[in-house]
């Protein structure tokens, strides 16, 4: 929204005010300015009002020679090409020396005649309609020679206010409201308005409001003897400066009052109001209504209509009807000034997709008291613009009972305490009074503050709101920062976050995986490429696209998607994500466990499950880094569509499966066009975190030497090597310090259906050197354990 | 001619049966159907066919072509199925088989830039006595709006701004959802931050994402003033940016704080003189903050005459973008390793 400082000057004296400094204060105290624009500076000098004395044609030329009285600048000969120039006109003359952009006016010879200036068009002045043809003819000009910028508000400074920063301030949607703030900031008076109107006793209309909740106030006034004509330049200029197109005097007057006082108005052609009646009612279901932009809408009981005795004539608070708008030949009109309920207007504007200056304002909860001022201001303006016009009715006004004035009890000490600034009662009172709050002090140190009606609709209701008023006008920059007085505490380092960070640190620093973050939504095209159709998901009512309709239940699809995305760019892929997945639950908030998922991919070398084993061992290392027991890896048992049917395993804490690890199914890898062999895992990180911690424990350094023994073990081909390893370790836990895998062998010398696993075992005792007999005893125990637990025997 | 066609078809069937892989299959495809293939060669004999027989022969040529084509496709899917089956076959696979030899060392991976910045902020706040909290991303309407004094008619509740779930819950639109939870969980007085992922129903472009990260800060104590807030913010931001910063407060409207502010930080690029980054204003809008609204304290079970507080919401995604001068917010959740790998630290 643009605010013209010339316009503000109608409400508060801005003489001598540095407007750029004011803009800064305004931003800090009221609302954000997106820009400050200085306009029309080039029209300040060498541009004056002129009076056309003579116009003569030049033989064979389309231009004409004129004599123009420019007061102190003399009667000038000026060549003019505009078809509409005529004797007796008041015009704008650019004298030699005037500049329009890069173009400077100079004495020049045109068609053999010396021209001493230029008669300007609106377009050349940069103030009007692009399409306006010919020169600008003034209708209310002062004496010739008067500086144009002195007579009209052409040199202006515009404040471009960020509308979003005004959503909670219904009082700031017009120049007078802004001027009230400016007056408070400057410590100047807000000028009183002269809104005296003489009404007649006639009551040519009846007003009936069916729904006072949706329309808390409706007023109408009738005017006769009006005529439509272009508005005078000052009015067109002000409208144009703030971005509103001038139409004709009546329409311009409604817009001007809206932009001035903030209350939208609507003008009806009197001829079109049937039955001398205005009815404010809900639309009937399926009722059709054509707005003045020519669009037809289906309206219904959610929408409020202004109707006459027969039909709708305006969509309340949003837009007038085509059937009753002001026409060029309108001579009698009805002016509506009303107040509508914010929510009702918002629903209609939103559903029909019509956002207007009017609806934008009503959506902010305007003050019903404003209606009377707006109506009177319009009448004053129209009586000026159309001297023959007469008010032919009373001020007809239907209103719900006004809200009682809001009183707020405000301890002075609380203001000072909350702001952290010793302002003193007098200064606080001065600030509040400057903003039109009525302040009394019924008991010492306690103010009784009455909120002005235009701040009471939704903006100000509690003492904290008043503290803000005082703070912003005083200036937050004037408050000295002060450290809070707090107790020292031992902050709780969130166990979950610490755990997750430890996992991240290990996976990046030691396992060499990059950390990824992906969207929380499932991406359906990817899911279908993977062949994954998740069961019950948390579904969105308004997804951002049909391809992302629900919350993810697994991190894996997005990890596979990342592999698909990066497969061409990198020969090896290593990444993981820690993030929430979502499981709907009946009658309570969805379960949102934090999962850890990872993927390793490398160009396939020897056909072994190398990436599977790399990930598996990374998880073993991770267990140490996060002080938790390692997960048990058990082959098989995984049914996710992305899991290789054989190269797969569950990840368990004891008997509880908390995740899985698998090579990516070759069919899925083919579908995703992965160049690499890839393996993935996913596990419930919350579950792992909640398991018993296994903090690193210190063991004294060995004081006695170790003995190494190799074991070549024959076992059935389907016996897991992990079981063999465990069988060896279990043979004599206090004497077996380590069981290291050496190799696997099948082939010549190994019976069909069996395999040979070679191990290097470290034997040691904490309290004595192991002598040969004892070593043999352990060896025997190992073979016994192997035979018993996994059917193992020595390879011959 | 018809006999020759039948012969070609038989020949093709036999050849396809003997094909062992895709490369051989493609050779056969060229051999039979290619521009210089057997079928094309045969077509050249067409001019010797009696005109009356030509339609019949032509039709048979098309049939043979179609049959060979479908035989090739059938063989192709057989081969593909066999290839997948072979890849799926690993009878000796042992998920527990240890890897022999010392583990390979890997080059270091990257912590996501959001993690790096979040960790730094967590460290800064922890050093100043703040608890670190963590709250759900799927929330109730009450927690996201009502508990924060956001009325039922507030535009933020519209479908245009919030992701709603079919079950009536929603994706939290701000980390402020944790304010009331934290008050009830910790009890006053306390200081806490709660960083996390938030969601807005928003069209995505280089500077807008529907999923981004925030960090909420909340302090509740017996005496908390605007002067305290300014001091705290200055100190916190100096720690975050690791240099002295100049801040200013402007009025800002957020229903859960009163007074509410937008906090601007003096432009770090130009030092306040005005540049493209700060749109010549010398200031960059950084975070909304304010004194906790009494209704929010009430929802947290606290008496607003007894307890006061301040809160702020720091945009982590924006901070990350500022810190690393990232031009497009979509990189953050885009999963592109060309982006992520730049954040590896040795
Ligand atoms: Zn700058």
Image (cartoon, coloured by chain):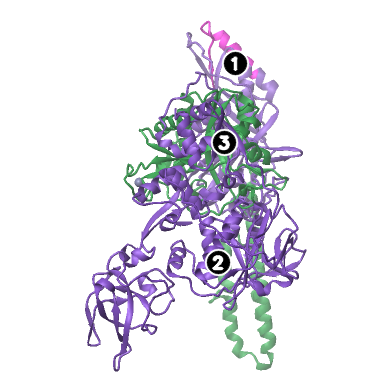
Q: Is residue A778 magenta?
A: yes
Same chain shared by disc 3 and disc 1:
yes
Mark 3 touching mark 2, by CB under 8 A? Answer: no
**Image-based side of B156 in relation to A139, left or right:** right
- B224 is higher (above) or lower (below) than B6: above
Identify the residue position indicated by label 3 in the image. Answer: A449
The reply to whether residue A597 is in sight is no
3 or 1: tag closer to the N-terminus: 3
Instruction: Determine the CA span between mark 3 and mark 1.
Output: 94 Å
- Shade of chain B as shown in the rendered figure: green
Identify the residue position indicated by label 2 in the image. Answer: B27
Q: Chain of mark 2?
A: B
Q: Nearer the viewer, mark 3 or mark 2?
A: 3
Q: Chain of mark 1?
A: A
The reply to whether residue A547 is in sight is yes
Give the quarter of the image for residue A119.
bottom left
Instruction: Determine the CA span between mark 3 and mark 2.
Output: 94 Å
Identify the residue position indicated by label 1 in the image. Answer: A779
- B277 is higher (above) or lower (below) than A298: above
What secondary structure is marked by label 1?
helix
Give the quarter of the image for residue A732.
top right
Residue B317, numbered circle: none
Q: Position of residue A416 (x, y in %)?
A: 48, 28
Q: Is residue A121 magenta?
A: no
């Amino acid at each position: 929204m643009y605010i013209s400082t010339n316009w503000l000057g109608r409400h508060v004296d801005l003489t001598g005010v540095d407007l750029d400094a004011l803009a800064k204060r305004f931003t800090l105290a009221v609302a954000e300015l997106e820009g400050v624009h200085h306009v029309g500076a080039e029209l300040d000098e060498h541009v004056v009002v002129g009076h056309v004395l003579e116009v003569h044609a030049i033989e064979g030329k389309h231009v004409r020679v004129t004599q123009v009285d420019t007061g102190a600048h003399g009667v000038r000969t000026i060549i003019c090409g505009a078809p509409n120039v005529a004797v007796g006109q008041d015009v704008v003359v650019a004298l030699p020396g005037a500049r329009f952009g890069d173009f400077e006016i100079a004495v020049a010879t045109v068609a053999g005649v010396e021209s001493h200036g230029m008669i300007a068009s609106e377009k050349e002045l940069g103030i009007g309609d692009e399409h306006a043809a010919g020169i600008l003819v003034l209708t209310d000009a002062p004496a010739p020679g008067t500086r144009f910028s002195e007579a009209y508000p052409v040199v202006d400074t515009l404040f471009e206010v960020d509308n979003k920063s005004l959503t909670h301030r219904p009082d700031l949607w017009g120049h007078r409201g802004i001027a009230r703030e400016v007056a408070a900031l400057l410590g100047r008076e807000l000028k009183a308005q002269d809104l005296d109107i003489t009404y007649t006793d006639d009551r040519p209309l009846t007003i009936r409001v069916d729904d006072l909740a949706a329309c808390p106030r409706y007023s109408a006034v009738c005017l006769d003897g009006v005529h439509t004509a272009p508005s005078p330049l000052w009015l067109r200029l002000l409208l144009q400066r703030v971005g509103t197109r001038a139409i004709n005097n009546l329409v311009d007057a409604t817009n001007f009052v809206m932009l001035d006082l903030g209350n939208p108005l609507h003008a009806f052609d009197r001829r079109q109001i049937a039955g001398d009646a205005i009815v404010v009612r809900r639309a009937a279901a399926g009722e059709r209504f054509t707005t003045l932009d020519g669009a037809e809408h289906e309206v219904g009981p959610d929408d409020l209509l202004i109707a006459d005795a027969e039909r709708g004539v305006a969509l309340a608070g949003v837009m007038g009807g085509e059937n009753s708008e002001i026409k060029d030949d309108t001579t009698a009109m009805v002016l509506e000034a009303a107040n509508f309920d914010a929510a009702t207007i918002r629903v209609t504007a939103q559903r029909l997709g019509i956002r207007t200056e009017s609806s934008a304002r009503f959506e902010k909860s305007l003050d019903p008291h404003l209606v009377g001022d707006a109506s009177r201001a319009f009448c004053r303006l129209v009586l000026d613009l159309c001297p023959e016009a007469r008010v032919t009715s009373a001020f007809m006004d239907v209103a719900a009972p006004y809200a009682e004035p809001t009183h707020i009890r405000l301890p002075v000490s609380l203001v000072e305490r909350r702001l952290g600034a010793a302002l003193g009662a007098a200064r606080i009172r001065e600030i509040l009074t400057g903003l039109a709050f009525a302040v009394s002090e019924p008991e010492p140190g306690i103010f009784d503050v009455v909120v002005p009606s235009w701040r009471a609709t939704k903006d100000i209701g509690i003492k904290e709101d008043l503290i803000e008023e005082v703070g912003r006008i005083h200036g937050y920059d004037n408050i000295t920062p002060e450290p809070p007085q707090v107790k020292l505490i031992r902050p709780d380092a969130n166990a979950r976050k610490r755990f997750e960070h430890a996992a991240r640190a290990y996976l990046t620093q030691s396992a060499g995986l990059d950390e990824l973050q992906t969207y929380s939504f499932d991406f359906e095209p990817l899911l279908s490429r993977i062949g994954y159709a998740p069961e019950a998901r948390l579904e969105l009512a308004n997804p951002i696209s049909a391809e992302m309709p629900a919350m993810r239940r697994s991190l894996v699809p997005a990890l596979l998607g990342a592999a698909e995305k990066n497969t061409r760019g990198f020969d090896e892929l290593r990444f993981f994500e820690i993030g929430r997945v979502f499981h709907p639950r009946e009658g309570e908030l969805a379960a949102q466990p934090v999962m850890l998922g990872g993927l390793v991919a490398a160009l396939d070398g020897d056909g072994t499950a190398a990436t599977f084993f790399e990930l598996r061992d990374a998880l073993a290392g991770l267990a140490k880094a996060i002080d938790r027991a390692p997960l048990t890896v058990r082959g098989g048992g995984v049914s996710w569509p992305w899991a290789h049917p054989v190269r797969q395993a569950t990840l368990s804490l004891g008997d509880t499966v908390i995740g899985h690890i698998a090579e990516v199914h070759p069919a899925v890898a083919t579908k995703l066009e992965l160049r690499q062999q890839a393996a993935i895992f996913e596990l419930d990180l919350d579950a792992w975190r909640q398991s018993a911690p296994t903090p690193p424990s210190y063991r004294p350094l060995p004081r006695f030497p170790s003995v190494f023994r190799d074991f070549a073990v024959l076992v059935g081909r389907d016996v897991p090597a992990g079981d063999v390893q465990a069988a060896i370790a279990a043979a004599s836990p206090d004497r077996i310090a380590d069981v290291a895998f050496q190799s696997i062998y099948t082939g010549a010398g190994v019976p069909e259906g069996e395999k040979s696993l070679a191990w290097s075992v470290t034997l040691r005792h904490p309290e004595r050197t192991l002598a040969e007999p004892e070593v043999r005893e352990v060896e025997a125990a190992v073979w016994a354990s192997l035979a018993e637990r996994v059917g193992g025997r020595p390879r011959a | 001619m018809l006999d020759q066609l039948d012969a070609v078809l038989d020949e093709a069937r036999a050849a396809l049966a003997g094909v062992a892989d895709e490369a051989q299959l493609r050779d056969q495809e060229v051999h039979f159907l290619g521009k210089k293939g057997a079928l094309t060669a045969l077509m050249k004999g067409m001019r010797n066919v009696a005109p009356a027989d030509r339609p019949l022969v032509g039709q048979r040529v098309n049939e043979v072509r179609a049959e060979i084509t479908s035989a090739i496709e059938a063989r192709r899917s057989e081969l593909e199925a066999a290839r997948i089956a072979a890849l799926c076959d690993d009878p000796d696979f042992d998920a527990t088989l240890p890897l022999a030899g010392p583990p390979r060392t890997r080059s270091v991976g990257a912590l996501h830039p959001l993690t790096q910045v979040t960790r730094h902020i967590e460290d800064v706040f922890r050093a100043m006595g703040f608890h670190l909290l963590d709250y759900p991303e799927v929330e109730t309407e009450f927690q996201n709006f009502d508990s924060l004094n956001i009325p039922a008619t507030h535009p933020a509740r519209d479908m245009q701004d919030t992701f709603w779930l079919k079950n009536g819950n929603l994706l939290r639109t701000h980390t402020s959802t944790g304010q009331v939870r934290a008050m009830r969980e910790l009890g006053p007085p306390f200081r806490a931050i709660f960083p996390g992922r938030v969601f807005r129903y928003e069209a995505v472009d280089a500077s807008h994402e529907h999923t981004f990260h925030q960090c909420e800060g909340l302090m509740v104590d017996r005496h908390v003033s605007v002067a305290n807030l300014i001091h705290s913010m200055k100190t916190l931001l100096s720690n975050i940016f690791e240099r002295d910063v100049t801040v200013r407060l402007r009025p800002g409207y957020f229903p859960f704080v009163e007074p509410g502010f937008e906090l601007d930080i003096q432009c770090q690029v130009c030092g306040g003189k005005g540049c493209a980054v700060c749109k010549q204003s010398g200031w960059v809008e950084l975070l909304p903050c304010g004194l906790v609204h009494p209704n929010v304290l009430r929802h947290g079970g606290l008496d607003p005459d007894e307890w006061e507080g301040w809160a702020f919401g720091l945009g982590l995604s924006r901070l990350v973008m500022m810190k690393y001068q990232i031009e497009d917010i979509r990189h953050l959740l885009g999963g592109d390793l060309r982006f992520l790998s730049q954040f590896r630290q040795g």
